Amino acid sequence: MHQPDIVIIGGGFAGLSAAVALAERGLGVTLLEAKPTLGGRAYSFEDAESGDLVDNGQHVMMGCYHETLDFLDKIGTRDRLIVQRDLEIEVLDGPGRPALLKTAALPGPFHIAAGVMRYKHLSLRERLGVLSAGLRLLHMRRFAPDQLRRMTVAEFMTATAQGEQARRTFWHPLAVATLNEQPELASAALLAQVLKRAFFARRADSAFLYPRVGLSDLYCAAAREFIERHGGQVASHRIVDRLEFTDGLISGIRLRDGTGLRASYVIAAVPPPQLCRLLPDTIARDQFFARIEGLKSSPIICLHVWLDREVTNSAFVGFVGTVTQWLFNKRRIFRRHGARHPGYLSFVISGASELADLPNDELLKMVMSDLRAMVPAARSARLIKALVLKEKHATFAPDPVSDAARPTVKTVVPNLYLAGDWIQTGLPATIESAVIAGRSAAAAIQRRITNS
């Protein structure tokens, strides 16, 4: 049988997981990445001055990331994750006002119920109200999904009479962290999916997992080695200029340098704007692709700061009531440390639409002010250097309208498939969503080859 020419455009989690799945099945695959290095929007690099690894954005995984963990198993890097078996988040509502949201050693979902009941930022009545709202969210997910898909998280909180303290210290941090959007805009249906998978399933699904290495070291090189070991090809710095069509099917790929590749099947694992630029106008005007152009995005800002001392022993801290939302202590997470500066912290601001255009020095001033207000030990620490990274199109905007416009893996072009965290997987834009889409696209191609 003729070996089909399968081309994957994009070398992030979606493209690499698709390529690994196809290569494992003995199908010839060529992966093209426009940048000099793999990783897409989830990559790392070495900071030359400090010697530390820097992630372009801080990513936390969970035990419910079953497809991602299986992907890492296949390429041999799952042991590069730190597994926090029981969910344990320190949340600061001001200096000297910490509270732990920690699951109990009980079967799911009782483990999360017990954790909420011990969450000291809420009164007993507020804790019961949070649990009641969570059950209501899951009930609507099952029995009133259409109504839930039209609601924002804020509208759901109003409908379930969640008070200001419950919103500030529980629902708001949860929504922003998992959906990358403010509750007034974020989809309640997507939040329900998060709760169902992460908190109302098995206890192990709630576990937090941190890469103890840089993101690129977690999966890029190992995936490339797996693909090439199984007969595939991975080419970086290969910019695709357009997809070429014959009789309604993709027949080839034209690169920016003028060279071309044959293509029996294509997986486009790139963001929506890039996908639309690859298509001829006649194809792009089809309703399937036209609605993709309307997908909005939501930014994430990540600030990395180096201090002359460590200021916290915690690996992960949530801030309430500040611009800054999350603190990651890289000295407690990364296995490899730079030798020059004792303190290395990363801060995350998700759903940062109103902040993304601010100057870097203004953002740094905000974050350092938040740090010193919430962590008193930081007030005497000296800031040595800082790095501000803005990912203005970090994820698709998870509002109800955008969520409804997300496309499927299969397209109206029979041999073109899509992959990425923005594909309709039922999940928000996470690593797990990207891997699910990549593997789904690979499986669809295999089925079509088998049945042809």
Image: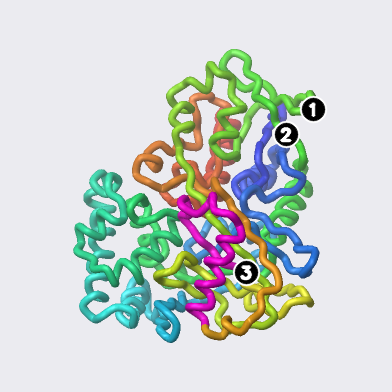
Of callouts 1 and 2, the N-terminal one: 2
Tell me the tag on residue 239. 2
Q: Quadrant of residue 265?
A: top right
The span from disc 2 to disc 3 (Cα, nearest Å) is 32 Å
Classify mark 1: helix, strand or loop. Answer: loop
Residue 102 seen in this snapshot: no
Residue 20 seen in this snapshot: yes
Classify mark 3: helix, strand or loop. Answer: strand
Residue at the (58%, 58%) spot, across then down: 70
Q: Is residue 103 above or below residue 219?
A: below
Tell me whether the residue at label 1 lies in contact with that at label 2, contact meaning CB atoms closer than 8 angstroms: yes
In-image side of 46 versus 443 (left or right): right
Q: Position of residue 273 (x, y in %)?
A: 56, 34
Task: State which quarter of the image contains the N terminus.
Answer: top right
Q: Quadrant of residue 55?
A: bottom right
Q: Position of residue 292 (x, y in %)?
A: 47, 33
